[in-house]
Amino acid sequence: MRLALFEPDIPQNTGTLIRLGACLGLPLDIIEPTGFPWSDKALKRAGLDYWDLADVTRHNGWASFNAARRGRLILLTTKSTVVYTDFAFKADDVLLLGRESAGAPADVHDAADARLTIPMRPGTRSVNVAVAAAMVIGEGLRQTAGFPDAKSRTQVPGESR
């Protein structure tokens, strides 16, 4: 599985997702432009010391990402009625998250092989993008037995066991 961020706006969320990808062994695709300078301190701070463990690919726009993509494109969106826990994930799926401020445009929705949502209380708009990614990728990894083997885990500098 892979995570992909469509034109992310908030560096802290992107940094958090870089860290999530590093911890779970998931590659992360960043579809530019981003709403922040790539060297932003907040991005680095949120990623902490996980940068060396992260597998991040930056794409110069939607067309570049879509041409390089392998596997089904699974868009997480509030504009769906398919609940993510009712979906059958595959190991090569790419979970795509839209911009924090605007979601994903119509052409991205049209390119998706599936569109999934997280059920929420009435009157709420959306779950934070990093939290949403963690919820959905957790279900996908559970279904595909894709979580890293805890026995083979290497210790991260500064971490105690």
Image (cartoon, rainbow, N blue to C red):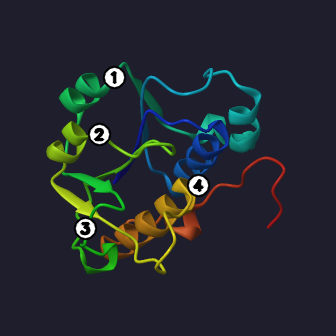
* Residue toward you, 63 or 103: 103
In this picture, is 109 found above or below 63? below
Q: Pick whichever of labels 4 and 2 is earlier in the sequence.
A: 4
Q: Which mark is residue 25?
A: none
Quadrant of residue 9 within the rendered picture: top right
Q: Pick whichever of labels 4 and 1 is earlier in the sequence.
A: 4
| Residue where numbered disc 2 is placed | 105
Judge left or right: residue 97 versus residue 13.
left
Spot occupied by residue 22 in the image (x, y as percentages of width and height): 56, 48
| Image quadrant in which the N terminus is located | bottom left
C-alpha span from label 3 to label 4:
20 Å
SS state under label 4: helix
C-alpha span from label 1 to label 3:
26 Å
C-alpha span from label 1 to label 2:
13 Å
Q: Pick whichever of labels 1 and 2 is earlier in the sequence.
A: 1
Three-letter amino acid code of the residue under disc 2: Pro
Q: Pick whichever of labels 3 and 4 is earlier in the sequence.
A: 4
Three-letter amino acid code of the residue under disc 3: Phe
Three-letter amino acid code of the residue under disc 4: Cys
C-alpha span from label 3 to label 2:
23 Å
In this picture, is 11 found above or below 136? above
Task: Give the mark toward the camera: 3 or 4.
Answer: 3
* Residue toward you, 129 or 95: 129
Query: Residue sitting at 26 percent across and 65 percent down?
Result: 80
- Circle 1 residues within 10 Å: few <14, some 14–19, many ≥20: some
| Residue where numbered disc 3 is placed | 89
